[in-house]
Image (tube, rainbow, N blue to C red):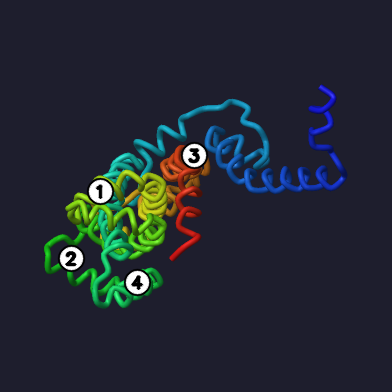
């Protein structure tokens, strides 16, 4: 018992200062979330007459119901519900397909050398830094030629193409940590390209897949520019609808509805980070020592 007490960390002035600073920083970053949550369950009368930091006197979910099902986003008053599911239909296939293609690309660049592979990898890295605005006009022309403009399928293709550079970079840096001897031994035993990938590479890829899932889902779900440019009236994502909801006025600004809508739009990305955040850090650090 005495040894355990001796080994316990002491609350020195330095530690107290660090803990105090961490608590203050946490409160500082949590304050906006508290304001949003509390405002979303307040009545408009309390919002007008009270303070932002006041606790709700008569909590109600009416603002949440309106934000989800009946708030006006321009000329349509259907709430965020149809646009939320548009985002789901856009993000899920785009994340899965871009991650799978990036996995195969990273596998090739890491373990199947070919003439010019360094040039290809460099080009993909350059693609990571191309601003959205640069690709808008060529993307619009290509989608128009393919008759996919203003559709959810068109948005899926846009996000797949734009995300492949990032996912390839992540997977390549992760796969170079897989011993080359392991892959060569499989080749000697007669295993081909896809057999090695399926039996050796893919089972080791859970951490980096989680990195790509989180990264891509966050980027795609929070995207506004591609959604407002390439999404038609029936294919707009939730970010565009949120912007329209906040900027649609009928004489009274309903701050509680706006706050509830903002939280609804942010919930999926928050849930993803809470569920799989540890894999994100593990996958990033796994590919940081080589390549």
Q: Specify the label residue 93 is tagged with.
A: 1
Q: Which residue is mark 4?
A: 127
The disc, 3 or 2, on the residue closer to the chain's N-terminal end is: 2
Crowd class of label 2 (few under 14; some 14 to 19; many from 20; radius 10 Å) = many
Q: Secondary structure at mark 1?
A: helix
Whole-percent x, y for residue 169 in the image: 37, 63
Q: Which mark is residue 143?
A: 2
Dot 3 or dot 1, earlier in sequence: 1
Rendered location of residue 112, percent (x, y): 26, 64
Badge 1 crowding class, 10 Å Cα cut-off, few under 14, some 14 to 19, many 20 or more, is some
Secondary structure at badge 4 equals helix
- In the rendered image, which quarter is residue 113 located in? bottom left
Residue located at (54% from left, 32% from top): 41
3D distance between C-alphas at marks 2 and 1: 18 Å
Q: Which element type, helix, strand or loop, lies under badge 2? A: helix
Q: Quadrant of the N terminus?
A: top right
Instruction: Work out how far the residue at label 3 is from the one at label 2, CA to CA, in angstroms.
Output: 35 Å
Q: Nearer the viewer, mark 2 or mark 4?
A: 4
Residues at circles 2 and 4 in contact by the CB criterion of under 8 Å: no
Side of 234 where 37 appears, left or right: right
Q: CA distance from mark 3 to mark 4?
A: 29 Å
2 and 1 marks in contact (CB < 8 Å):
no
* Marked residue nearer the N-terminal end (2 or 4): 4
Question: How far across and down, in percent of the image, does residue 62 sit?
Answer: 46, 30
Name which residue lies at 50% across and 54% down.
Answer: 285
Is 46 above or below relative to 230?
A: above
- Which numbered marker is on residue 141? none
The tag earlier along the polypeptide, 3 or 4, is 4
Look at mark 3 in the image and give the residue it sits on.
Answer: 274
Does 172 appear above or below 138? Answer: above
Comparing 157 with 57, the one in front is: 157
């Amino acid at each position: 018992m005495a040894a355990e007490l001796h080994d316990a960390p002491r609350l020195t002035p330095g530690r107290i200062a660090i803990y105090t600073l961490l608590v203050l920083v946490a409160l500082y970053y949590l304050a906006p979330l508290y304001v949003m949550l509390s405002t979303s369950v307040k009545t408009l009368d309390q919002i007008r007459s009270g303070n932002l930091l006041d606790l709700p006197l008569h909590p109600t979910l009416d603002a949440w119901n309106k934000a989800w099902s009946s708030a006006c986003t321009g000329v349509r008053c259907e709430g965020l519900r149809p646009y939320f599911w548009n985002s789901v239909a856009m993000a899920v296939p785009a994340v899965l397909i871009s991650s799978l293609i990036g996995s195969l690309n990273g596998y090739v660049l890491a373990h199947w050398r070919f003439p010019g592979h360094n040039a290809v990898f460099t080009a993909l890295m350059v693609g990571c830094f191309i601003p959205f605005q640069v690709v808008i006009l060529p993307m619009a022309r290509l989608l128009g030629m393919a008759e996919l403009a203003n559709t959810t399928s068109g948005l899926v293709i846009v996000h797949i193409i734009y995300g492949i550079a990032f996912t390839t970079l992540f997977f390549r840096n992760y796969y170079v940590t897989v011993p080359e001897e392991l892959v060569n031994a499989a080749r000697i035993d007669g295993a081909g390209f896809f057999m090695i990938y399926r039996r050796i590479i893919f089972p080791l890829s859970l951490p980096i897949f989680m990195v790509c899932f989180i990264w891509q889902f966050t980027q795609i779900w929070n995207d506004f520019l591609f959604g407002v440019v390439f999404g038609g009236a029936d294919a707009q994502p939730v970010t565009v609808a949120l912007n329209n909801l906040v900027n649609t006025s009928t004489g009274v600004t309903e701050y509680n509805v706006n706050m509830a809508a903002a939280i609804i739009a942010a919930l999926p990305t928050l849930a993803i980070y809470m569920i799989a955040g540890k894999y994100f850090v593990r996958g990033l650090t796994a590919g940081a020592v080589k390549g």
